[in-house]
Amino acid sequence: RGVCQIRGTDVLAPHGIPIDLLDRMLIIRTLPYSSDEMVQILSLRANVEGIEIEESALRLLSDIGSRTSLRYAVQMLTPARIVAETVGRTAITDEDVKDIDELFLDGKASGQMLAKTEGYMQ
């Protein structure tokens, strides 16, 4: 698995990268963000976008981010703000985040749904 032909040659190598180059590459190990780190990142992003959000909603978004991805959690900020504004609030609450989480799917859940339904949504 992962052994491919190097472009322009007949040589097979891991990931299609010449072995001598692969030996010189630096591998950096990354770890998933903790819940507190996600809260901090989401809070910074909300401040940058000028979005007011309650602490409990930040915690809920970080839980969703732990379950799915941080990218998905960050992308939920804008729709949650729009839902809060339509109700007449200036700050995002838990209920706004729950509503948005029910409306949208993250990439992995969407892919699983499409695989299960053979490419057609029901």
Image (cartoon, rainbow, N blue to C red):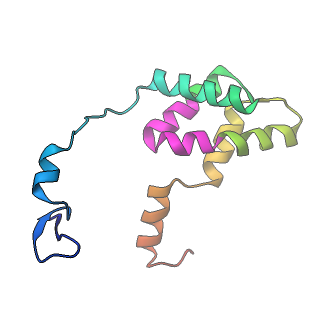
- The residue lying at 49 percent from left, 33 percent from top is 63
Identify which residue, 81 or 22, lies in the foreground.
22
Q: Is residue 54 magenta?
A: no
Query: Horizontal and vertical percent for residue 96?
Result: 71, 38
Q: Is residue 53 left or right of residue 19?
A: right
Compared with 105, 39 (above or below) is above
- The residue lying at 89 percent from left, 35 percent from top is 88
| Rendering quarter of residue 57 | top right
Compared with 42, 109 (above or below) is below
Identify which residue, 78 or 92, lies in the foreground.
78
Query: Horizontal and vertical percent for residue 30?
Result: 30, 34
Indicate the quadrant containing the C terminus: top left, top right, bottom left or bottom right: bottom right
The mark tally for this picture is 0
Query: Horizontal and vertical percent for residue 68?
Result: 46, 45
Q: Is residue 90 left or right of residue 71?
A: right
Indicate the quadrant containing the N terminus: top left, top right, bottom left or bottom right: bottom left
Q: Is residue 100 left or right of residue 38?
A: right
Compared with 70, 13 (above or below) is below
Q: Please provide the residue range marked out in magenta.
A: 60-76
Query: Horizontal and vertical percent for residue 4?
Result: 17, 70
Identify which residue, 105 or 49, lies in the foreground.
49
Extreme residue in the right direction: 88
Compared with 38, 110 (above or below) is below
Magenta stretch, main secondary structure class: helix
Q: Is residue 64 magenta?
A: yes
Identify which residue, 84 or 71, lies in the foreground.
71
Q: Is residue 54 left or right of residue 13?
A: right
